[in-house]
Image (spheres, rainbow, N blue to C red):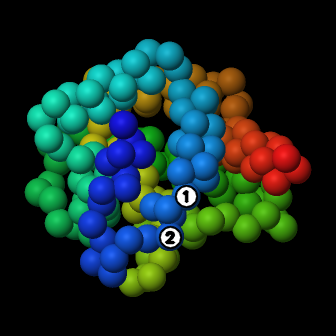
Amino acid sequence: MEWAMFTSVRNRGGRASCQENPDTFKIIRTNTFMTWSEATLESYCGDLIRAKETGRNLMTEKYARMEGRFPPLDPELVEIIDKIVKQECAWAEELMVKYPDVKMARPIYSSQDTPYVVSSETYSRGELATYSKKTLELYIQDILEMKTKDINRIELAMALMSREFSEKSQA
């Protein structure tokens, strides 16, 4: 469902090259989702189904939110998103310190956004804003549980992706 939504996003400059690469999209999204609890995954799947049934494209909404072209969210949802993003940015910083030679795909903070590069913070806020309240509440539980177990979700997702990209390149 996400791929169908993603490939139908209309960019201002035409189709992005990433919209032509389903394998990379699948690896990135699958390995990100592997860090989520089953309850969060089920809730997000429900979000996708409801969006499809009502003609919403969550990917279009994500990019529109990243560009500030959607109305503000309910303050309660913003509070949850702020907590999630704060922890994700902290994990990204930890990762950069732990692996200084690893280059992140994006800068961490929205203060580093440019017209050509969007930060992880801005990207995450845009995506999280498309989730239902239930999915956000479950996801923040996942985040807090990982934090108490000293698991860096960003590092875990990147390790999973790296392994899969490596296996793909060797095939």
State which quadrant residue 8 falls in: bottom left
Q: Position of residue 140 (x, y in %)?
A: 43, 30
Residue 79 can be seen in this image: no
The residue indicated by pointer 2 is 17
Contact check, label 1 and label 2, Cβ < 8 Å: yes
Q: Residue at x 45, y 82 (%)?
A: 116
Residue 76 is tagged as: none
Q: Position of residue 42 (x, y in %)?
A: 40, 19
Q: Along the line of sight, which residue is nearer the eye, 66 or 169?
A: 169
Residue 123 position (above or below residue 127): below
Residue type at numbered disc 1: Asn
Q: How many C-alpha atoms fall within 10 Å of the one at disc 2: few (<14), some, or many (≥20)?
A: few
Q: CA distance from mark 1 to mark 2?
A: 7 Å
Q: Residue at x 30, y 23 (%)?
A: 46
Q: Position of residue 9 (x, y in %)?
A: 30, 60
Residue type at numbered disc 2: Ser
Q: Position of residue 65 (x, y in %)?
A: 25, 59
- Image mark count: 2
- Give the structural element (helix, strand or loop) at label 1: loop
State which quadrant residue 123 falls in: bottom left
Residue 142 position (above or below residue 157): above
The residue indicated by pointer 1 is 21
